[in-house]
Image (tube, rainbow, N blue to C red):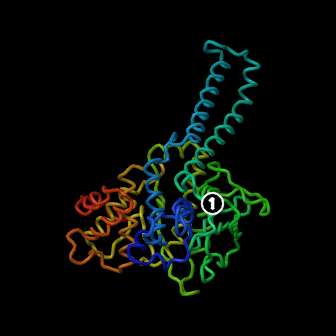
Amino acid sequence: MAALVRRGAWSAVDEVVSVSGGSITNAALAAAGTGSSDPSPGGPEATDDDASLEALAALHDRIRRDRARPFATARRGAAVASAVAAVAAAAALFVAAAGYGPVAIPRAPGLAALVALVPVTAILIRRLVQIAFADAATALALAPDAPRIPTGAPRHHVVCATGLDSGHPYRFSYGALPPAAGVLAAPRPAHVVRHTVALADAVVASVSLPGLAHRRTPAGLGGEILVDGGVSGVFGIAGPPDPHADGHEVLALDAARHLRTGGRLSRAARRVSLTARLARWLQVSLETSYLDDLAELPPERLVRICTPVVAVRDTPVERALARARAVTAGLGLRDLDDTHIRCALLAAYVGTLLVLDATDGGGSEGEAVPFGADVAWLAAVLGDAGLTGTWRDLLGGPPPPPAS
């Protein structure tokens, strides 16, 4: 979005569609709307660009302050503390039922208590984890005073989720409808839910996997549990939108960590745990659908943040982007430190500028630091002077790992 504003193209965008973690940014922009800035008396009115940049800066600030830490908010902290207390209480009862510790439970009642305790504790902990996960997604995406249902957004925002029972895509629609039919007219059957579900609930549904959150469709649509929108395809439809159907252009930003094998611990867990194998199977199934959808997009319409790409030409900018992607290859909620955040931002921002400029990767003419002025502008917008230093380091860093 910042790259589009920088090149004067954001006002031409009439639809923003997101699945999974991309819905956090999409929701922040949908909640902003035109005129969310507070211009000085007598000064110029806030423009769509101003409002969107303000929303982006606020999102950046929330991420840097929150970092999805377990105790970043009171609600999340209470849920995490309760889960820890539940585990500790269950462990104490196990010890007592085994006849150890200061208090011993008679064996027969103790065994009965243990049988009942296991599922009850598991359900309680799962529910507490769901509360903490939903709080983290909501706190990152939306400010406390964000509108519940943003009807006045100047462009169409679609947050995609998938019904766990039916497998049908759900498209939560907010703001102004696009001049053309857009994603809502995609041929695959889907449920369009417009201006009736809270934006926070749509975001949580879009980023959820089974067991991590618990959002249901409205009662009129069956009340089924919703999960990650990427199950229905990267664009919430079967494959990317056809740019030839209505004359629109498509620009995709891919932040997925495609088909990573995981560390030694996860590989060891898959050897002995059926649950771990099923989780890996689900991950492979999801990411394969991502890859299939993105493969249909030409390179000039796709910007990758975490996945290595084979550059057309070996230039300083392409090497810097490769170094940034190498840093963000393992990006997740546990990696929201300044280095990962800045590298992800630069991979997305400069990568999008390259697409918009249709350059060969050499940067702006006459600049000592390629795209240096553009990065300095973004640093000023976000209030993060460290972005410029990180970009210089990426330009002059060691060779990046080869792309597969």
Q: Nearer the viewer, residue 383 or 72?
A: 383
Task: Name which residue lies at 54% across and 59% down.
Answer: 24
Q: Position of residue 1 (x, y in %)?
A: 45, 69
- Quarter of the figure with the C terminus: bottom left
User: What residue is drawn where x is 61% and y is 74%?
Assistant: 176
In this view, which residue lies farthest toward the top? 102
Q: Is residue 107 left or right of residue 369?
A: right
Q: Amino acid at mark 1?
A: Leu
Q: Tell me which residue sits at (23%, 68%) in the image.
A: 369
Crowdedness near tag 1: few (<14), some (14–19) or many (≥20) residues, C-alpha within 10 Å: many
- Where on the picture, by quarter, is residue 118? top right
Q: Position of residue 290 (x, y in %)?
A: 53, 67
Is residue 196 depicted above or below 112 in this figure? below
Q: Is residue 357 left or right of residue 280?
A: left
Callout 1: helix, strand or loop? helix
Judging by the rendered image, the residue that carries numbered circle 1 is 199
Q: Nearer the viewer, residue 106 or 218?
A: 218
Q: Position of residue 129 (x, y in %)?
A: 61, 42
